[in-house]
Amino acid sequence: FILRDSLLCGQQGINAFDVDRLISTSFIYDNRLALHHSSLPLLQNFLLHRIYLFEHVYYHRTVRAFERQVGEIIVETLERLLPSHPLESLRDYKRLDEFYFLSCCQQMKESSDAEERALGVKWEMILNNRPKWKQVFSHAVTSIEGPVVTAKNVEDNIKSELKEKEILFIVDKPEVKCPENVWKAMEDGADAIVIYDPLKPGKIDPFGLRNLLNRIPAKVTAWRVYVSEECSEEQRLQIQELAQKYICGTRTGQLSSY
């Protein structure tokens, strides 16, 4: 998916030739998966580009805003479209593909049922690319262990200091991790991949993978704070100030305007 999505997003961080080389220089040596040392830069580039795609594409601020927006109504929507258990209504379940689902969501706003019409209005916002949540603060944290504080901790702390308790906001904390099977080398010393180097004793570089992973963050946490579109400028500034306090402390995060 890294190669596919890089192409679709116009990113040139990695291409098919790089992937082919990684595959062609990987082999079994002494009953272990080995990578030729000449391909270490390619592996590093691949892992860094994977982090880039997660942080800036899959976890893009607008993508995450819409995911939260969909999450607020998806359960109620499915209960209306498929009220019974799928095993009790296989025909209805089979019919519930993406096209049928979106078609029903578009028709809900014309329903005679008031609650369903309200649900339809919410889906209309999503389908018309109108996010309910607007980002007002962001801060990226790169570390091996990552921050121990949770998004709920930050939300609770901000709520406790709000002058106006009815302000609607959410705290998002998507995390991008280095693949666990690769990072395992840093945790227990059992390298998932050995680096083959014919010039080294035993033809294995004992520090090759570790040196590579030391240059790659184990985790990137993208803290983001969103407010509802109804928030005033004064309320937005209040949320920004509290987010700065509880997420960054004395450090500086990125304040967003919309």
Image: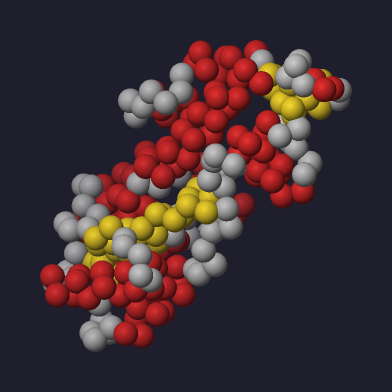
- Please tell me which residue is depicted at 21% across the width and 52% down the height of the picture: 130
In the rendering, at what x and y percent does residue 173 appear?
44, 59
Q: Is residue 105 visible?
A: no
Q: Front-most of 244 and 125? A: 244
Q: Front-most of 229 and 163? A: 163
Query: In this rendering, would 240 be left or right of 230?
Result: right
**Quadrant location, the C terminus:** bottom left
- Please tell me which residue is depicted at 28% across the width and 83% down the height of the picture: 162
Q: Can you tell which quarter of the image residue 24 is in? A: top right
Query: In this rendering, would 100 be left or right of 221?
Result: left
In the rendering, at what x and y percent does residue 136 appear?
25, 62
In the rendering, at what x and y percent does residue 252 appear?
31, 62
Q: Front-most of 153 and 166? A: 153
- Please tell me which residue is depicted at 47% across the width and 40% down the height of the picture: 51
Q: Front-most of 121 and 210? A: 210
Q: Can you tell which quarter of the image residue 234 is in? A: bottom left
Q: Is residue 29 visible?
A: yes
In the rendering, at what x and y percent does residue 193 appear?
72, 31
